[in-house]
Image (spheres, rainbow, N blue to C red):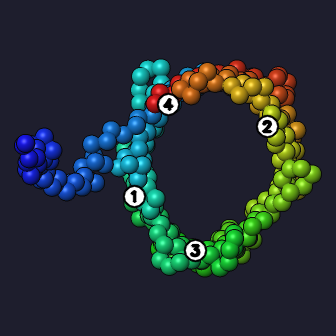
Amino acid sequence: MLEPSSQTPDYLISPITTPAPPSPPPTKPNQFLSLISNRPSLRVTSEFDSDSRVFFHKVSCKLFDDLAKLKLSFVNNVKREISGSLLALTSKHLSIHYDPEEQNALIKTSFDVGPKLQFKAAHDVKAKRGEVAMVANVADPGYAVEVSSPVPYIGLPKATIRFPTGEVTLEEREDEEVPRKLLINGILKGPILNGVGAAHYTDEELRLRYSYKDESLSFIPSISLPSNAVSFAFKRRFSPSDKLSYRYNFDSNCWSAVYKHTYDKDFKFKAGYDSEVGEENGKAKTAPMKMKVQFMLQ
């Protein structure tokens, strides 16, 4: 009689596997190269004004993963002459606006120097003038104090106090009759009758304005004192793509109406009527028709 073998059969022996070599650590992508390799999105806007018969063009794109924005704007007439060009580079802390025709640049910067303190500065290269300002957020929310002064220094600095319902500005100005005088300007706003009421006091003129707005209707009357100039604006949205705007000034009998239709996000159409009604040397003033067509490509 055969005795069972004490050896384990070959098919029951687990094969010896060689461990796989460790995978190399993942390489971190170069952030600078990724910012450069990403193609910036380009947006082109062209608008035609039939009254002045000129085209307004704007070309803009975002750079460095939306950290900065480059914008070029210029005017083109029917003779294909280009004028009014302006090149702007803007970011969170720095903006540069360059005018090629004037060969001038306006530089603005702002940054935080503390938890509740901000520094702002502006400089006109050609005029060799500018302004510096300090903004302090004294309380939250919406309370701040701003002190600004022109460079070179002229007179007292301008002070602005901001609060949730408006702001007050104290500024010293020179006049022909009075060498220097202190002016007080301010804005006060708040909810009134399901809308927002605002009072603007600037250069000894008070302007009262009421604004009511819902999903389909906007109504904005206003009056200026002491001139008693009354005007109102009316906007009606018929659909998400159709809107009508109307404005009338009672003191000058001047009114305008604009119809806007949006076909999609890249194409908009505007047509309107702008009139100056009244008598001029015994004749009615001309009432030109205006039409604007806006194309947007992104």
- Comparing 18 with 159, the one in front is 18
Q: Where is mark 4, residue-wise?
A: 45
Q: Label 3 crowding class (10 Å Cα cut-off): few <14, some 14-19, many 20+?
A: some
Q: CA distance from mark 4 to mark 1?
A: 30 Å
Q: Nearer the viewer, mark 4 or mark 1?
A: 4
Give above or below for 276 relative to 143. Answer: above
Give above or below for 7 relative to 144. Answer: above
> Residue 294 location, x and y as percent?
56, 25
Task: Indicate which disc residue 98 carries.
Answer: none
Secondary element at image label 3: strand
Q: CA distance from mark 2 to mark 3?
A: 36 Å
- Residue shown at 82%/23% (left/top)? 284
Q: Label 1 crowding class (10 Å Cα cut-off): few <14, some 14-19, many 20+?
A: few
Q: Nearer the viewer, mark 2 or mark 4?
A: 2
- Residue shown at 84%/60% (left/top)? 190
Give above or below for 221 relative to 112. Answer: above
Q: Where is mark 3, residue-wise?
A: 135
Tell which circle, 4 or 1, labels the residue nearer the N-terminal end.
Answer: 4
Whether residue 121 is visible here, answered yes or no, is no
> Residue 62 location, x and y as percent?
41, 44
Q: Where is mark 1, residue-wise?
A: 126
Secondary element at image label 4: strand
Q: CA distance from mark 3 to mark 1?
A: 27 Å
Q: Amino acid at mark 3?
A: Val
Tell which circle, 3 or 1, labels the residue nearer the N-terminal end.
Answer: 1
Q: Where is mark 2, residue-wise?
A: 215
Q: CA distance from mark 4 to mark 3?
A: 35 Å
Q: Amino acid at mark 1?
A: Lys
